[in-house]
Amino acid sequence: MAALTRLSKPSFTSLSSVSRISRCLYSGIAPEPSSHGASPYSPRLGPKPNLSVKDPKDRNIQWVFLGSPGVGKGTYASRLSNLLGVPHIATGDLVREELAASGPLSKELSEIVNQGKLVSDEIIISLLSKRLEAGGAKGELGFILDGFPRTIRQAEILEGVTEIDLVLNLKLREDVLVEKCLGRRMCSQCGGNFNVASINVKDSNGSPAISMAPLLPPPHCMSKLVTRADDTEEVVKHRIHVYNEKSRPVEEFYRSRGKLLEFDLPGGIPESWPKLLEVLNLDEYKEKQSAAA
Ligand code: AMP
């Protein structure tokens, strides 16, 4: 309740939340100088990010994934997290965990989420701070943030406490986003994410044709599949509308700082994953993966 009381005082709230994020992000790590407008490396052309961090005091990568609901942020962030050994932190997952815990925030959160609206910046910052603190206590370094920041205010708060190296903006045409969301399923037992949609849309109004094969679950998950309550057509369309209104400006926020890397998904995972590794200058990982296969 104390946290909730603090959250009702906006000016104090952001300071308190910021200092919590800050403490967590910088625990034991010397802050890097902030360089607005000058990213540590140019996502497109610059040298490769230093991904082979040996000294635990070195700071690991700090990336942000942007993109409309259903674009695949979770899928690609999770793959990169496994590949690079850096935590994948999805604020949507934090919200769903809070909902499942049936705590004091659950009722308020479920109404907001099920209508496809955004949770307040204060609540999201508080959930994220707690997650970062818990990760910091376990020795986690760096992050791939998925679903945060989603408003300019969140972006400003994040910028105030740490340096973001790269912002990946995943893009897909809107009719495909809706189909993908409607096809999403999760295994209620193992938590695996799948998609039963078989997408095949023709080119129209300058948008290229796109095909995506379904990502079917193994037989033992088949009977345990559930659909997210906010993946109905009406709510998905509203979430895309909210993204365009509140989160699209965040793309410009990072574009103007030279940190935004745009990535148009060419298709499903088999087509998109190798291309993504290529644009991220991670080809060496692709080679290692195929050598190990
Ligand atoms: P997602 O799984 O990213 O689609 O998030 C599910 C829901 O959690 C969203 O529709 C929002 O209600 C809430 N949410 C997640 N991240 C944020 C955020 N950064 N700001 C506000 N609300 C969020």
Image (cartoon, rainbow, N blue to C red):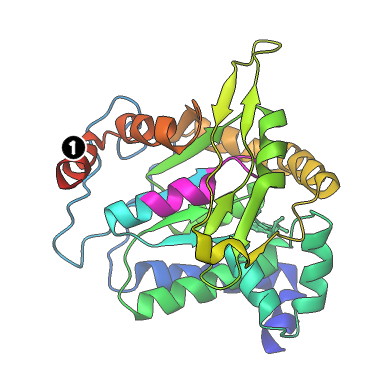
- Can you tell me whether the CB of the residue at mark 1 lies under 8 Å from the nearest atom of ligand 1? no
Q: Is residue 165 left or right of residue 234?
A: left
Foreground pick, 196 / 265: 196
**Type of residue at label 1?**
Glu
Residue 71 among magenta residues = yes
Furthest residue toward bottom: 1
Q: Is residue 124 above or below residue 115?
A: below
Q: Residue at x 82, y 73 (%)?
A: 108
Foreground pick, 57 / 85: 85
Q: Quadrant of the N terminus?
A: bottom right
Q: Which residue is mark 1?
A: 287
Counting from the top left corner in percent of width and height, residue 200 is at 63, 25
* Range drawn in magenta: 66-79
Residue 268 among magenta residues = no
Foreground pick, 11 / 208: 208
Q: Is residue 62 left or right of residue 112?
A: left
Q: Residue at x 62, y 46 (%)?
A: 196
Q: Residue at x 49, y 69 (%)?
A: 21
- Dot 1 falls on a residue whose secondary structure is helix
Q: Is residue 68 above or below residue 222?
A: above
Foreground pick, 290 / 280: 290
Q: Is residue 48 above or below residue 116?
A: above
Counting from the top left corner in percent of width and height, residue 168 is at 46, 38
